[in-house]
Image (cartoon, helix red, strand yellow):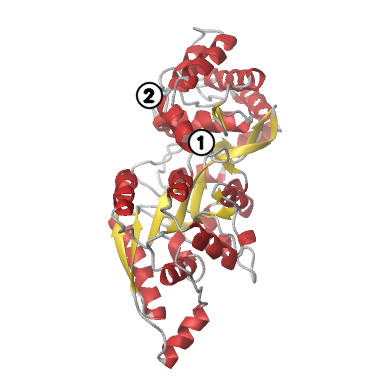
Amino acid sequence: MKKSTLLTTSAIVIGLLTGTAYADTIRFWTTEHQPPRLAKQQQMADDFSKLTGHTVEVIPVEESDLGTRTTAAFAAGDLPDVIYHTLQYVLPWAEAGILDVEANSDIVGDLGENTFAPGAISMAQFDGMTAAVPVDGWTQMVVYRKDLFDAAGLKAPTSYSAISEAVDALHNPPSMYGFVAATKVDENFMSQVLEHVFLANGVSPVDANGFSSLDEKATTEVLEFYKKIAKASPEGDLFWQQSREIYFAGKAAMIIWSPFILDELAGLRDSAPPTINDDPTSGELASKTGIVTTFGGPSNSGGAAWADIRYFGVTNDANTDVASEFVKYSMSDGYTATLSIAPEGKFPVRRGDASNPTKYVDAWSKLPVGVDRKAPLSELYAPAMINEIVAGLETADRWGVKEGQLSLASKMINAQAINRIVRQFIDDEISVSDAVSKMNEQLSAIE
């Protein structure tokens, strides 16, 4: 790693005024390649250049190509200075020497580790350091009809038991389904939802040594819970589309979805309008909706939230000083602009700074969301719901992260064996004990 002197913004400005500052160019790879998002990142680069004199070359990269392009650039000794990347690359790139772990950990320390969501920090730990700088993320959510829950005196769906009670109270098909669970086995949506449900009960198929047999008791609890919510769903092969359509029609009490539903719920996207009434631009459904990001099962009362976290990684080929300053700028003075690229899916993993611990959460909540119409989340949803949206990052988790087995866990998920076996159990083709045995047998064969 190149030795880094992390200059403060004020020091850079003083240097410019005295004529002693140096100027350089760094390369920044980003997977946010859509033209409107690229334009915002270019504006951030221009603002940084005006402040420091340094130039940032913003280079779009397809997310599907990021792994192979990075590996090739590393082999050629030609990595960019900073890469915006997903969670899946943090630990493998740290182990391979692609990331300058010490520089990234120093950045987090300078910004204040305690200003970041703990889950985002814990998932990037490598040899006692934070291997990449958490930027933004989102957590999967239980989206529910709060008005119906309140009217029936039901608790928020923060646990298997609370969800089951709500299903019993509200399931009245075809006018109202208790849940719309993912059941289409070849859809990644089902994989994602199931991982969340397993995590909620503390069940994982991996440990530090690789495959780990699923605990029979806890996995049985997972399967029986999922069967209950699936039986309270419409028939057929269900995935994200039906979940959203049925909830938007006012015919579902609960679904599991990503936060990208938030602007649609409020009638801001013509391609996915709420149909609960005759006005596709109405905010009625949003006003009746609550969300839960962290829920737990009987074997894991603390619960978990399934999260997708993105990071800035200063690389080992970087101009470390300038790259670090750019990341620090993007996470402080430029952080609101960073989040504005797509605020409905970019929750602030840095909540504030030493002077104001909620500075960035407050700013993010006022950023406009929507496609055909725009409005800030703070005008669409109550403060308690805004806080719940961000709170999921506190308990953010994924299979294989803390065990150093994210790659193996990803292969298990992508194989869709869990989906197929869960569907067989839901359809009463196999017993719960057979389902646990089949999962252990098939997952153990994945390398």
Whether 363 is drawn above or below 67: the answer is below
Whether 13 is drawn above or below 67: the answer is below
Please indicate, yes or no, whether residue 33 appears anywhere in the rendered image: no
Q: Amino acid at mark 1?
A: Gln
In the rendering, which numbered label is found on residue 377?
A: none
Q: Residue furthest bottom?
A: 18
Q: Nearest the camera: 25 or 250?
A: 25
Q: CA distance from mark 2 to mark 1?
A: 23 Å
User: Residue at 47% across / 50% down in the picture?
Assistant: 94
Whether 116 is drawn above or below 324: the answer is above
What residue is pinned by disc 2? Answer: 186
Report whether 408 appears left or right of 305.
left
At which x and y percent is residue 37?
34, 58
- Mark 2 touching mark 1, by CB under 8 A? no
Characterize the local packing of mark 1: few (<14), some (14-19) or many (20 or more) Cα atoms within 10 angstroms.
many
Report whether 199 appears left or right of 420.
right
Q: Quadrant of the C terminus?
A: top left
Q: Nearest the camera: 297 or 279?
A: 297
At which x and y percent is residue 21?
41, 85
Please indicate, yes or no, whether residue 143 appears anywhere in the rendered image: yes
What residue is pinned by disc 1? Answer: 405
Q: Amino acid at mark 2?
A: Asp
At which x and y percent is residue 361?
57, 60
User: Residue at 30% across / 59% down in the picture?
Assistant: 78
Whether 103 is drawn above or below 185: the answer is below
The mark nearer the N terminus, 2 or 1, is 2
